[in-house]
Image (cartoon, rainbow, N blue to C red):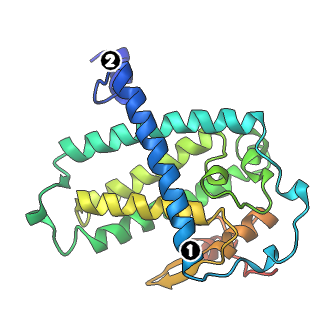
Amino acid sequence: MSLGERASQALNPWALGPGALLAGFAAVRGGIYIWDNVVEKLVELSGVRKLPTRDKPIKPELQPPLNTLSYIYLTFNAINELIFVMNITHFLWHSPLVKLRVAELGVLNTFPALYVIFLAQDMIYAPTHRFMHWRPVYPLVHKHHHRQIYPSRGYADAANEHPIEHMIGVLCAWGGIFAAAYTTGVHAATLFVFFNIHAALAMLNHSPYDVEFSHLGFTYSVKAHEMHHRKFSMNYAQYFMFWDRMMGTFKEYTA
């Protein structure tokens, strides 16, 4: 297979035509928009309070509006998300590593696999995230994402990042998926649940809601991520804060 053929397969593994690609793009965008709003509404209905820092009006410069570069990045990242969806569905359908039938649901390829995906993903993401804060690298890639000191727009703030950073996030997700595939095994239903939870938590991490929970080391806290946006040099992990404790970068929340 030539380099051009490999690139074509990576960018469009289903070999879709222009019309199908546009339809797929619209479906992905629509799905993300609906899920973003559903998650926010469910959190509101659950009675979760807003973070303590959101009790008073925030200075506009700490919550700047999306600028031209933000919209450019969001557009590139939306295209990357379509490519990722096509690749993950192609992998799910064709790879012998992924079980598809209901009868193949097992003890290991469901909840343990889900745990391994999140654990391995964050194991890669936390030190990579810290690297993006290294002074020579920070202005080149990650700085744009930190325009928001107090994120509040859910998906729009979560995805408002340099396309290189967005690709790093995609690669971390692949790392988690392969970690589960080669250890516990993984079922298609598990991947479906993972992506929905992962998207919801990414949206909430860039919202004003005080959502937090902890189970078996999985410690999720919007407060921890708000601290990262406010102070920059702490709380690099998303789901397992013991990675930050190991790196000496964990910081408890202060309002």
Instruction: Indicate the position of residue 196 as horizontal and vertical percent values.
Output: 41, 60
188 on left or right of 86: left
Q: Judging from the image, what secondary structure is the residue with disc 1 in?
A: helix
Can the viewer see residue 241? Answer: no
Disc 1 crowd rating (10 Å Cα; few below 14, some 14-19, many 20+) is some
Quadrant the C terminus occupies: bottom right
| Marks 1 and 2, the one that precedes in the sequence | 2
Which numbered disc covers residue 43? 1
Residue 130, quarter of picture: bottom right
Query: What amino acid is found at the position of numbered circle 1 in the picture?
Result: Val
Q: Nearer the viewer, residue 212 or 126?
A: 212
Q: Is residue 101 left or right of residue 152?
A: left
Q: At 46% from the left edge and 84% from the top edge, which residue is drawn?
A: 215
Q: Between tags 1 and 2, which lies in front?
A: 1
Quarter of the picture containing the N terminus is top left
Q: Is residue 55 above or below residue 147?
A: below
Residue 198 seen in the current view: yes
* Residue identified by numbered label 2: 5
User: Residue drawn 80% across and 60% down?
Assistant: 149
User: Percent x, y for residue 86?
Assistant: 35, 37
